[in-house]
Image (tube, helix red, strand yellow):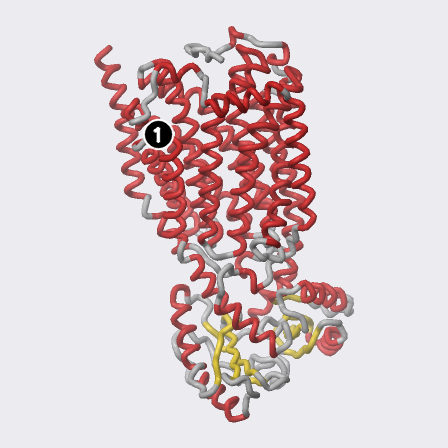
Amino acid sequence: MKSLSRWSRWLVPALLLVLWLGIGGTLGPYAGKLGQVATNDQAAFLPQSAESTRVLEARKAFERSESVPAIIVWQAEDGAPVTGVQQQEATASLAVLAGKPGISGPPSPALPSDDRLALQAVAPLAPDLGDELPAVLDEVRAAAESVPGLSAQIAGPAATQADLADAFSGIDGLLLGVALGAVLLILLLVYRSLLLPLVIIISAVFALGLACAAVYALADHGIVRVDGQVQGILSILVIGAATDYALLLAARFREELAARGDRTAAVLAAVRRSAGAITASAATVALGLLALLASDLTNNRALGPVGAIGIVCSVLTTLTFLPAVLALLGRTAFWPATPKAGDATGEGHRVWNRVAALVGRAPRRVWVSATVLMLALAACVTGLSSHGVPLDEIFVKDAPSVAAQTALSRHFPGGSGQPTVIITDAAKASDVQAAARATDGVASVAPVTAGGRPGDGEPLVVDGRIRMDATLEAAADSDDAKQTVAALRTRLHAVPDANAIVGGYTAQQYDTQRTAARDRTVIVPVVLGIILVILFLLLRSFLLPLLLVATVALNFLATLGVSALVFEYLLGFSGTDSSVPLYGFVFLVALGVDYNIFLMSRVREESFVHGVRQGVLRGLTTTGGVITSAGVVLAATFAALMVIPLAFLVQIAFIVAFGVLLDTLVVRSLLVPALVIDIGPRSWWPSSLARGPHPDLLPKNRAPSTP
């Protein structure tokens, strides 16, 4: 029996290791394949019940073939007015594109602006070009640039899609390289060990490969939709979460190894005593993400299950692969900083002894000061605008499509190239057109004809309905344009029996903004309710979960306050994407509760023996280093999103990175411990801890830590 036991101590970890090596070798490449099933077509992520989405479906009946417009704008190189000859040459330059691969129809004639300083034309491109889109755009650009004396640029949806694809091209390589490199560097500096950081990185990579393989299969069968944003967040979330959970387990293993000496017993004890906190923490994040299924935005709903899959895979590697490797390596995992018997005393790092002493000396002063600081930061949140990011701020770096759209808007009405689409009953066409023209902010309205263009012949009637294109005076992505759309809908809906609906780019932005506001109203309470239930079950207390959720909510508001200042005065953003506050809330509240779970699980364990006051101080001292390291690692991984030059990801990266650091260094280190000490045992009501310490309830084989 002893021989069998000795063999099993090596065999089980070895088999787990071989299993994970097989999983990693087989599924690891899917981390680079996920882009094959991702789509960056922004029309696929509109509100499902919005009026603009119904227009998007209805307008297909008026198109001879599906297309994505590329808008060509010409300007004279010397700034002079465009001549009639140049207009004819511009039209002729595009005529050669008709019938070529990737071009779904004949380009429109080149039309001059009112100031005669520019020309514009539209080339319809096939909607499913994928990786071939840049090459087709290059062909369009080459044809347009053949006109002597004129410079050509390309704007419109096709050009924006190409720039988005270029921005997301770094997800598979650059983003992962930066994130993993940052994590590895931090772990090497903090733990001064050569093997442990590599083991943790491998564990995170295995989790990412497994998650990407699962998401790939679901996306390939149309069960979930994935775009570049969701793909990037999944990579960062898995690396950050898997590393955090691994750090917690490794720290507990080091402590148990120093106390017990036997590697197998230490691994089993570490898993047993950290699994509850890890799974509870993972549940808060996974269920919080799944609450996004209540969103009416498709990409929000996609992030819910995709992110939850990533969290589950992170927990799997942490509780199976990592214990197997630690059981095989033992103390060698920490070489050259191998743990000694004295490390089991729980004295912790001297920095955290000082922090605990500060909290213990004046808990009320500490939590009041921390709260005042957080409230002051939160007061700045009123300066944060979440009405969407204008087109010229979508890309952090200069993008050709943005420069072209700027040139287009300079010479043509602001809504040129992005018309507002009206679908109405043909019998009421004249009434609807008159009402639309009478709406402030509408520059022109014309029905689409059989030729496929507004105002070129008799209106095209399909099933008793016609389509009109309205050009707005304001830029299509501006607040003024959105207000015009709202006014236009009000006026057209009032036309009797017209059944008019209004869509197009500006309407889509307006509907997305309204839907995001609705989502925050619905999802925020759901996330808070989920987290409260998990904390009630884990801590068996009523007051303490309320306090923890209140502190992380305060941290979220303080982070948004700082973000408002940074975005406006340092990064030059006029506002945030409408979904940014919701994403920031889900990540910060769920991840913030994570660290409080790590802390309070240990505090609860210590309080059974030493009472609440000493339990808090001991828990803070023993977990301070590992939780702070985990916070720094998570902040660094999310900060890696900034390598993708998109405003949305840069904003999410800053909010989560700064918020995690603020939560780790202020909320979890000062505010929460001081509050619990000041309230005393009552904070654990109705748990038995409210009645004092219970040494007999200490888990078996647990050596009490010494102060």
Q: Could you say where residue 124 lies in the image, as x and y percent from the top left?
A: 49, 75
The residue at 47%/59% (across/down) is 40
Asked if one can make out residue 423 in the rendered structure from this viewpoint, the answer is no
Element at badge 1?
helix
Asked if one can make out residue 78 in the rendered structure from this viewpoint, the answer is yes
| Residue that protrudes farthest toward the left in the picture | 3
Classify residue 640 as left or right of residue 692: left
The residue at 70%/65% (across/down) is 480
Classify residue 479 as left or right of residue 356: right
Q: Could you say where residue 232 lies in the image, as x and y percent from the top left?
A: 45, 49
Foreground residue, 139 or 423? Answer: 139
Residue 367 found in image quarter: top right
Answer few, some or many: residues within 10 Å of disc 1's Cα (few below 14, many 20 plus, some between 14 and 19): many
Foreground residue, 413 or 672? Answer: 672
**Tag 1: amino acid:** Leu
Q: Which residue is mark 1?
A: 322
| 108 lies above or below 564 | below
| Residue that protrudes farthest toward the bottom in the picture | 85
Residue 46 found in image quarter: bottom right
Q: Could you say where residue 435 lies in the image, as x and y percent from the top left?
A: 76, 74
